[in-house]
Amino acid sequence: MSTETPTTPAAPAVDPRLLVRKEGLAGYFDEFTRKIRSGELGSLPVVVGLIVIAAIFQFKTGSFLNADNLTNITKWIAGPGLIAVGVVFVLLLGEIDLSLGSVAGATAAITSVLSVRQGLNEWLAILLAVGSAIAIGALHGYFFAKIGVPAFVVTLAGMLAWNGLQMLVLGTLGTVNNPMDGVVANLDTYFLGDGDIIWAWLFAIVTIVLFGGGQLLDSRRRAAAGLPARPISEIALRTGVIGVVLLVAAYMLNQDSGLPLPLVILVGVVALGDFVLRRTAYGRQIFAVGGGIEAARRSGINVAWVRISVYMISAGLAGFGGLFIASQQGSADKALGSGNILMSAIAAAVIGGTSLFGGRGKTWSALLGALVIQSITTGLDMVHAQQAIQYMITGAVLLAAVVLDSVSRRTQKSHGRG
């Protein structure tokens, strides 16, 4: 006769990523605290940082939050912000591109020389210049992905080479002024007219509708597939918060001259990049390669093509960003793309939440990070701080972002989510 006593079967382990949060605000708060404890900070540090920066400089200057200053910030982030979007794609692979500042300068130089000195149609000059930037990215990607040269070395060589090309193209004069009514000059203007307030309101309302509709559609799709989905109450809360932010932003912009064209283009590029990364097979391949090259290769992903194409995207966006920088300074010169442009773009991507270790990040992080960098720069200019101080503070913020990323990754690993 058996003397064994019946035992209660052990409860199966539950993956916390599959838990459906409780309905209502209490459930939302529980999920929020769980993510904080496990190191999933998301954009929270950046948003808090922006609020603190705005409060400090408003207290120091009394005019930081004036409409004209905020409008200028949204215009000035376009060039570095577009470069930062390209940086996000590269960082998702766990790599780096040091050539983007030189590519931006070379693109602006080629555009100006072809259109002004050679008399070529400006639209055609822009297409040829940006196409040249994309070809440069393909060349970098080829040496990295096919030949096996480390990306750091390839892009460092590119930084020197394309800076030399920029100087060669501009020649001894060194500076080419933009035509007053040209395409490049008009990049730094207002969307469909200066002073027309309807466009800022329309842009905000359309964005709110698209965001809320997208959230609702995604929830219904997940529910239909039997997956955890956000409740309607949470969708309404998220859409409401975004709506308040956008409507306040539209109001502030309209207190000055309306909706800046650079902001519209930057947000459009960020949204397109977000769609590519989150909603397409190609985007999932980028995350897969950044998460583990060998695993991605074994799953049938063409790793070499993904790497080459990402460098093409980053270089193309850098060239596009260079045109905005040329528009804002009124000319293409030998200094365009030098200085802290590259470091600001990399800092913007990292500060916004993109991991330096690959596999984690969003294009929206480039927008948020660019706002942080430009807000710091503008605020320090307003209090007449030396440029050396600006560099030191920006470097400290970048270091803090990397430390936060490292701590976050370590915390996630300790919770079984790394």
Image (cartoon, grey):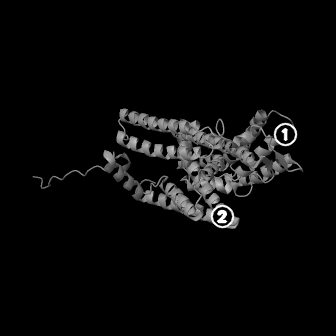
Q: Position of residue 41 (x, y in %)?
A: 46, 55
Determine whether 349 is above or below 127 in the image. below
Direction from residue 253 to residue 335 in the image, left or right: right
Q: Label for residue 390?
A: 2
Direction from residue 124 to residue 398 in the image, left or right: left
Q: Label for residue 361?
A: none
Determine whether 321 is above or below 38 in the image. above
Q: Is residue 82 visible?
A: yes
Determine whether 150 is above or below 141 in the image. below
Sequence-wise, the earlier of marks 2 and 1 is 1
- Crowding at dot 1, Cα within 10 Å, few <14 / some 14-19 / many 20+, comes out as some
Q: Nearer the viewer, residue 177 or 42?
A: 177
What amino acid is labelled 1 in the image? Val
The residue at which mark 1 appears reads as: 116
Q: Is residue 14 visible?
A: no
Q: Position of residue 311 (x, y in %)?
A: 66, 44
Q: Position of residue 86 (x, y in %)?
A: 63, 46
> In what element is the residue under mark 2?
helix
- Outermost residue, right side: 172
> In what element is the residue under mark 1?
helix
What amino acid is labelled 2 in the image? Gln
- Crowding at dot 2, Cα within 10 Å, few <14 / some 14-19 / many 20+, comes out as some
Task: State the residue at coordinates (75%, 47%).
Answer: 326
Q: Position of residue 364 (x, y in %)?
A: 55, 46
